[in-house]
Amino acid sequence: MIESIGVGLILAVVSAVTFIAYKHPTVYRQTYLGVVVFVSAICLFLCIFQLGAITWSAYTIGQMAGHQDAGTLPQIATEAVTLVTLLKWLAVTASIGAMVVAYLFLLRRLRAFLPEEPPNHAFEADGSAAAQLKR
């Protein structure tokens, strides 16, 4: 249930940012730098937090390995699994942050890829739908 709510919120945010970038490119260009700095700061904070957890986990493994008890071996294995998991989360966080910044940059350049005005076949040149219905 919570996963579907989270996915829905993420989809809503991506759709809103894409809509703003397409319909209001000047507003998006004005807010682009602030959004990129905000996203980068969040990713940097999460990466630093995970680096701290990785360092603590590696330190704990080193401390436990120094005792060489038979009872510490399962604890060392648990910490090793934790260390590998933290390394994976660090890679995922950095990758997602890079993809988000790249998507925001792509949206900034969106108008360069699209034609100025898409053709509107539903209306006549004067904008009335009545002329279209007479045909």
Image (cartoon, rainbow, N blue to C red):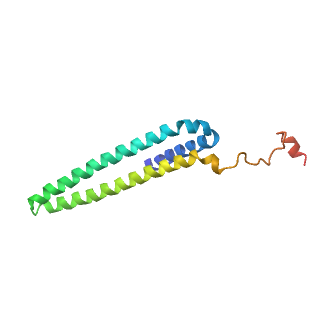
Q: Can you give x and y, in whole percent of width and height, for residue 51 in the image?
A: 29, 50
Residue 128 lies, with reference to residue 83, above or below; the image says: above
Label total for image? 0
Q: Can you give x and y, in whole percent of width and height, for residue 10 in the image?
A: 49, 46
- Residue 84 seen in the figure: yes
In the image: residue 23, left or right of residue 11: right
Please report the residue visible at 43 percent of the width from the left and 49 percent of the height from the top. Answer: 97
In the image: residue 128, left or right of residue 109: right
Q: Can you give x and y, in whole percent of width and height, for residue 63 in the image?
A: 13, 55
Q: Residue furthest right?
A: 134
In the image: residue 123, left or right of residue 11: right
Please report the residue visible at 61 percent of the width from the left and 47 percent of the height from the top. Answer: 110
Q: Can you give x and y, in whole percent of width and height, for residue 42 in the image?
A: 39, 42
- Residue 11 seen in the figure: no
Closer-to-camera residue (12/26) = 26
Please report the residue visible at 34 percent of the width from the left and 53 percent of the height from the top. Answer: 90
Please report the residue visible at 31 percent of the width from the left and 49 percent of the height from the top. Answer: 50
